[in-house]
């Protein structure tokens, strides 16, 4: 059933039938209780600008005690990033990142990023933590850019986003994966804001 619902959602997305796509994704998340689908639904709703419904799905994962800690930490991190990126709500973002630190501190790399975003560690220390794998390095560079953006240091933010993009072989923004997709989008916003 899950595969059918996800396939139908993909077909509707290809047809630009967003309401139907989200309906199938929501059914898949409800009926299977799969936290990965709920997270993907949150990300998709974010892409569509429906941030409050994205938070609902992220919170669903965060507050599900039977779900793996790494997935709950990821949902909290994404919720915080959404609040910071689109709502410029650093207070709300910090609340989600604090959840990562307080509840999911053993969840691999994500709590290190939350520590940095909350100001518990400096950039130099954080940089020593992001070189373990190409994935953590790319995510780390994105997080550095986001932190600088929240501090209104547009130049440092843009430089970090560019470093993140260099860690991807994909040049088509439509095919980029997170975090490069976010880095490309945020870099465009910074350039649009500066009128360049």
Image (cartoon, rainbow, N blue to C red):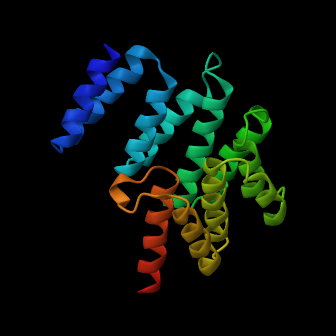
Residue extending farthest to the left is: 15
Q: Position of residue 46 (x, y in %)?
A: 42, 48
Residue 59 or residue 34, whichever sits in front: 34
Residue occupying the point 62% across, 44% down: 77
**In the image, is 138 to the left or to the right of 36?**
right
Residue 57's place in the image compared with 122, above or below, is above
Residue 35's place in the image compared with 46, above or below, is above
Question: Where, quadrant-wise, is the C terminus in this rendering?
Answer: bottom left
Residue occupying the point 69% across, 43% down: 110
Asked if residue 32 can be seen in this view, the reply is yes
Asked if residue 92 can be seen in this view, the reply is no
Q: How many marks?
A: 0
Residue 2's place in the image compared with 178, above or below, is above
Residue extending farthest to the front is: 169
Residue occupying the point 61% across, 20% down: 67
When asked about the image quadrant of residue 30, the answer is: top left
Question: Where, quadrant-wise, is the N terminus in this rendering?
Answer: top left
Residue 30's place in the image compared with 105, above or below, is above
Q: Position of residue 180 (x, y in %)?
A: 50, 57
**In the image, is 2 to the left or to the right of 135?**
left
Residue occupying the point 45% across, 39% down: 42
Q: Position of residue 186 (x, y in %)?
A: 48, 66
When asked about the image quadrant of residue 131, the answer is: bottom right
Q: Position of residue 80 (x, y in %)?
A: 60, 49
């Amino acid at each position: 059933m899950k595969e059918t619902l996800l396939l139908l959602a993909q077909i509707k997305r290809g047809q630009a039938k967003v309401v139907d796509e989200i309906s199938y994704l929501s059914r898949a998340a409800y009926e299977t209780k799969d936290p990965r689908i709920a997270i993907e639904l949150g990300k998709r709703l974010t892409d569509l600008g429906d941030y409050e419904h994205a938070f609902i799905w992220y919170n669903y994962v965060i507050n599900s005690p039977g779900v793996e800690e790494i997935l709950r930490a990821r949902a909290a991190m994404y919720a915080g990033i959404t609040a910071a990126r689109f709502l410029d709500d650093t207070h709300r973002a910090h609340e989600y990142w604090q959840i990562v630190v307080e509840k999911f501190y053993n969840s691999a790399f994500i709590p290190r990023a939350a520590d940095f975003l909350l100001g518990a560690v400096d950039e130099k220390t954080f940089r020593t933590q992001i070189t373990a794998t190409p994935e953590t390095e790319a995510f780390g560079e994105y997080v550095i850019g986001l932190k600088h953006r929240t501090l209104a240091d547009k130049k440092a933010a843009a430089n970090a986003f560019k470093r993140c993009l260099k860690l991807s072989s994909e040049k088509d923004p439509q095919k980029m994966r997170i975090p490069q997709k976010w880095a490309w989008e945020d870099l465009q916003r910074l350039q649009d804001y500066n009128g360049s």
